[in-house]
């Protein structure tokens, strides 16, 4: 019995059920063919296969078209239900941020927390009052596994730190500016590289343990080194300490504009590297309606 059942299931082409539905509703091979955008011989061939599958004539030709048999009338509601279920499966997920309960988990650095994540969370809450936003530090390892388990939705980082082989979207580009808390410096003042390297520099590294970064690489091209005397893990700490000490720091321009300070923005002949901020996500979330909405919100916020 089971073998016969499996054989019958394998013999049914979903397109045959679609053809049956059209034939039952139109009561005409010609009209059913037009409805399906197929030729009349093609639909006649499908009817022949349907008769074999159901072991019944299903439709009898008359002078006015075709008339369903009692067997056809009996199975028509069931086939309609099956096709409705298939259509539901093929439709994209419905997602209404206004009524959905969900948690958005974003992995980003201190830099991103001070630039776009504040506006991002406000925008999410405005459109989705039942949402929660969790901002997570980037772990030293295992981030892809966390994304696969659904523990992280998006990773925001500089392109150099982006996760390879994951879907990515460029959010925006940024550049470095040089800020000085030395009291004798004026906003817009030009500074030579030799003088720049004589000053005391502060540097942001998430671990707090590095004293070298992209600026040092750019200086090395000119054969120079700077004096990095302070390494801190966050930009908030950097700005706080610069308010009480005479220091120079190269920081991203969006960060420079996000804090309240009166530091001088000085000009140097150093060719500064740029930043490209990208978002990564796991491929399994590519077509998820909620995730697509989050990505769209993130992009709109990042580019304003």
Image (spheres, rainbow, N blue to C red):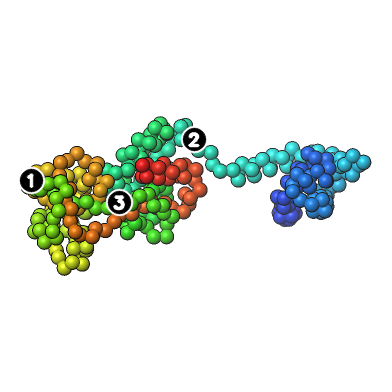
Residue 250 pos. (x, y %):
19, 53
Residue 69 pos. (x, y %):
85, 41
Residue 192 pos. (x, y %):
13, 59
Which residue is identified by label 1?
Answer: 183
Q: Residue at x 7, y 47 (%)?
A: 184
Q: Residue 174, which numbered label? A: 3
Answer few, some or many: residues within 10 Å of disc 3's Cα (few below 14, many 20 plus, some between 14 and 19): some
CB-based contact (under 8 Å), mark 3 and mark 2: no
Mark 1: secondary structure: loop
CB-based contact (under 8 Å), mark 3 and mark 1: no
Mark 3: secondary structure: strand
Residue sitting nearer the eye, 179 or 14: 179
Mark 3 or mark 1: whose residue is earlier in sequence? 3
Disc 1/disc 2 C-alpha distance (Å) = 53 Å
Mark 2: secondary structure: loop
Q: Residue at x 39, y 52 (%)?
A: 170
Left or right: where 65 falls relative to 12: right
Answer few, some or many: residues within 10 Å of disc 1's Cα (few below 14, many 20 plus, some between 14 and 19): few
Q: Residue at x 7, y 45 (%)?
A: 183
From this viewpoint, which residue is outermost toward the left? 184
Which of pointers 3 and 2 indicates the residue nearer the eye?
3
243 versus 157 height, above or below? above
Which residue is identified by label 2?
Answer: 96
């Amino acid at each position: 019995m089971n073998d016969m059942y499996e054989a019958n299931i394998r013999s049914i082409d979903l397109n045959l059920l679609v053809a049956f539905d059209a034939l039952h509703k139109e009561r005409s091979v010609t009209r059913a063919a037009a409805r399906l955008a197929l030729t009349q011989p093609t639909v006649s061939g499908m009817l022949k296969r349907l008769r074999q599958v159901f072991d019944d004539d299903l439709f009898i030709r008359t002078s006015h078209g075709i008339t369903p048999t009692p067997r056809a009338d009996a199975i028509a509601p069931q086939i309609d239900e099956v096709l409705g279920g298939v259509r539901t499966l093929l439709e994209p997920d419905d997602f209404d941020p206004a009524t959905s309960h969900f948690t958005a988990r974003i992995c980003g650095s201190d830099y991103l927390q001070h630039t776009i994540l504040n506006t991002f969370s406000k925008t999410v809450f405005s459109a989705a009052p039942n949402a929660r936003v969790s901002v997570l530090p980037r772990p030293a390892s295992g981030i892809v596994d966390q994304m696969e388990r659904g523990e992280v939705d998006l990773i925001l980082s500089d392109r150099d730190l982006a996760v390879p082989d994951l879907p990515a979207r460029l959010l925006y580009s940024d550049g470095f500016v040089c800020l000085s808390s030395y009291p004798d410096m004026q906003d817009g003042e030009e500074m030579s590289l030799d003088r720049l390297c004589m000053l005391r520099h502060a540097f942001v590294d998430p671990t707090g343990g590095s004293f070298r970064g992209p600026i040092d690489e750019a200086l090395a091209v000119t054969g120079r080194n700077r004096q990095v005397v302070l390494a801190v893990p966050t930009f908030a700490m950097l700005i706080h300490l610069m308010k009480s000490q005479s220091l120079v720091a190269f920081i991203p321009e969006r960060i420079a504009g996000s804090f309240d300070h009166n530091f001088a923005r000085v000009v140097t002949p150093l060719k500064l590297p740029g930043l490209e901020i990208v978002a990564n996500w796991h491929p399994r979330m590519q077509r998820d309606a909620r995730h697509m909405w989050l990505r769209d919100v993130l992009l709109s916020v990042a580019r304003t």
